[in-house]
């Protein structure tokens, strides 16, 4: 990658209402630093900003932008102004990989936050890894992204030192749901359905293993196409199976109509899923048909955390039209983690980033391993695999059209 001077004014990128100056520009009016000048550092943001999952993606984008606004307001890193460059992956792995390549090819981007989907994150890892650019996901939960393909065999191997995440993984989310359903709700018969994606299939797998270990019975299994909306054939099978519940490994655009059609087929089975069902869109799509359905999600409810109160107040004051959704707090913390890693590098280098962006990216990635702080979602920090050290999870039940928390805790090895 070519060298670039921190004194050169280059391009300007407009994203939404934000104007993104290129990293390395000088803003003589912004103050800060010994000379009154500031270096602009860009953080890439990748999420599904359009399409079926855009509600979650927009919540990630807004929260990441808020983290940058607050950091700049507080002069978090002396002499540095942060900007967000947001790209839309539409929930597609190929598009996500292209976006990663764009970020890497832009000498002004120091690191990236995102994506939402695990299969998209998987497609981006190598691109960032080859460039020594840090990537922090607020939402990828597939264990193999940090612990390798053989993690279930106990052969954990970190494939990319550049990859981190602030959310707990499906290695604990699936089993946590299984324990709740078997021990608390006394459900014994499960019908398992997944959408064949990295996230959905993996989550359904970890749930199934733990449910069977506890003594539960699997009365049926199926796969669906997440782009379909007619699930009547599968719904009929579920009704005939007499299952206590359906565990669905997938996302809300298909999960909500699946639940509704299971009810219409005459089954009283609840639909239970992971964090990709924990969305206002799930209840909007399913309406009364999804009452009583359950979803797990990473962390504790933000409303219950003192560390989240300021975030929620600032988000409301910022006037965003869409809610921060399930991953807003994690996106804020992911962005702040990048900011604090930059801060560590600046302080180590006598108040500035290295002039060579290759060196700057490498040092920021290395600094990320030691980043710890009290975040919106609780204590933020990373283990030797790049996974969050915060392993809390919650169960939510749809009551009167809203997801209400019914349990928060940690997975306990059975």
Image (cartoon, grey):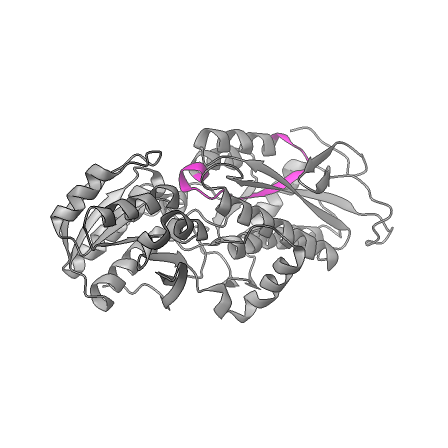
Q: Which residues are magenta?
A: 105-121
- Quadrant (top left, top right, bottom left, bottom right) of the C terminus: bottom left
Given residues 345 and 69, the one toward you in this image is: 69
Q: Is residue 99 above or below residue 212?
A: above
Q: How many marks?
A: 0
- Tell me if residue 87 comes above or below residue 62 in the rendering: above
On the image, the x and y values in percent for residue 384 come to: 44, 53
**Where is residue 94 shown, x and y percent of the image?**
46, 29
* Quarter location, residue 46: top right
Does 362 sit above or below residue 345?
above
Q: Nearer the viewer, residue 337 or 99?
A: 99
Residue 370 appears left or right of 30: left
Drawn side of residue 100 relative to residue 207, left or right: right
Residue at 15% in and 58% down: 216
Q: Can the viewer see residue 392?
A: no
* Residue 113 within the segment the image draws in magenta: yes
- The picture places residue 23, in percent across and down from the top left corner, at 72, 39
């Amino acid at each position: 990658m070519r060298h670039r001077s921190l004194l050169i004014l280059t391009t300007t990128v407009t994203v939404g209402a934000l104007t993104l100056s290129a990293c390395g520009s000088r803003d003589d009016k912004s103050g800060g630093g010994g000379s009154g000048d500031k270096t602009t550092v860009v953080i890439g943001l990748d999420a599904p900003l359009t399409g079926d999952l855009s509600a979650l993606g927009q919540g990630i984008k807004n929260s990441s932008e808020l983290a940058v606004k607050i950091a700049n307001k507080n002069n978090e890193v002396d002499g540095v102004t942060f900007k967000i460059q947001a790209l839309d992956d539409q929930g597609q792995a190929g598009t996500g990989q292209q976006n990663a390549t764009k970020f890497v090819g832009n000498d002004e981007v120091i690191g990236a936050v995102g994506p939402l989907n695990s299969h998209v994150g998987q497609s981006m890892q190598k691109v960032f890894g080859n460039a020594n650019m840090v990537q922090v996901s607020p939402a990828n939960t597939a264990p193999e992204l940090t612990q390798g393909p053989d993690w279930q065999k106990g052969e954990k191997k970190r494939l990319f030192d550049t990859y981190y995440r602030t959310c707990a993984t499906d290695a604990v989310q699936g089993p946590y749901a299984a324990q709740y359903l078997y021990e608390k709700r006394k459900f014994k018969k499960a019908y398992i359905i997944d959408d064949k994606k990295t996230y959905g299939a993996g989550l359904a797998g970890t749930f199934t293993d733990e449910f069977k270990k506890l003594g539960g019975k699997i009365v049926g299994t199926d796969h669906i196409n997440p782009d379909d909306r007619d699930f009547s054939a599968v719904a009929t099978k579920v009704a005939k199976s007499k299952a206590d519940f359906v565990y669905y490994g997938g996302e809300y655009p298909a999960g909500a109509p699946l639940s509704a059609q299971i009810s219409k087929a005459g089954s009283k089975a609840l639909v239970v899923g992971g964090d990709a069902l924990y969305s206002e869109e799930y209840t909007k799509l399913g309406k009364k048909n999804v009452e009583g359905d359950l979803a797990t999600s990473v962390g504790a409810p933000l409303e219950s955390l003192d560390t989240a109160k300021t975030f929620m107040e600032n988000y409301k004051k910022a006037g965003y039209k869409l809610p921060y959704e399930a991953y807003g707090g994690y996106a804020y913390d992911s962005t702040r983690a990048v900011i604090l890693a930059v801060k560590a590098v600046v302080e180590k280098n006598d108040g500035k980033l290295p002039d060579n962006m290759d060196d700057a990216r490498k040092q920021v990635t290395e600094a990320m391993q030691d980043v710890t702080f009290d975040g919106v979602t609780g204590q933020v920090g990373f283990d030797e695999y790049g996974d969050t050290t915060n392993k809390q999870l919650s169960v939510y039940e749809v009551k009167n059209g809203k997801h209400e928390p019914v349990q928060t805790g940690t997975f306990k090895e059975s």
